[in-house]
Image (spheres, rainbow, N blue to C red):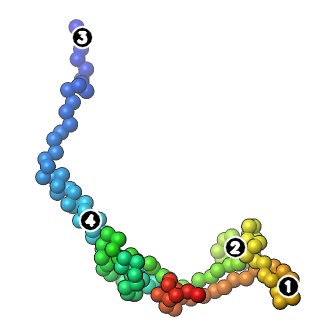
Amino acid sequence: MQQRPPFDLNDFRPPRIPMRLVRIGIIVVLGFIFLYSTFFTVGPEEEGVILRLGKYVRTVGPGLHFKLPLGIEALYKVPVQRQLKEEFGFRTVEAGVRTRYSTRNYDEESLMLTGDLNIAVVEWVVQFRISDPYRFLFRVR
């Protein structure tokens, strides 16, 4: 006598999900996406610049804020209370260690032409703070 397997895949039928539950699930997911793209937070050291369809609209300070959802308004966060730095001719390998840096592949940016047409190799650091986020993002010269 042939034994029947405990579970026959030919007899398997997936459970039917009521259309009402599918609609409710879609509405909940779309609502979550809508809310997630509507509210945003700006950190204590930052200011947020809001663009509506690519054009500057406003600047917001730290805290919880609202913007138009789904890509209509975009947010750019700018650190305004931090001192930033750019290194030319080298890169620091590890923060906090003064003597460890790498000059590999950065030779071209450290070359300068002097007034008497000689080439000098100068490694330098520029430290700066952003005072106006709008001008930093859109009016840099």
Please identify the residue farthest to the top as the structure is shown. Answer: 1
- Badges 3 and 4: C-beta atoms under 8 Å apart? no
Amino acid under disc 3: Gln
**Secondary element at image label 3:** loop
Marks 4/2 in contact by CB < 8 Å: the verdict is no
The residues bearing labels 3 and 1 have C-alpha atoms spaced at a distance of 97 Å
Q: Label 2 is placed on what type of residue?
A: Arg
Quadrant where the N terminus sits is top left
Give the mark nearer the N terminus: 3 vs 4.
Answer: 3
Q: Which residue is mark 3?
A: 2
Q: Is residue 116 left or right of residue 49?
A: right
- Badge 1 crowding class, 10 Å Cα cut-off, few under 14, some 14 to 19, many 20 or more, is few
Q: Nearer the viewer, residue 37 or 6?
A: 37
* Image quarter of residue 26: bottom left
**Crowding at label 3, few (<14), some or many (≥20) Cα neighbours within 10 Å?**
few
Residue under pointer 2? 91
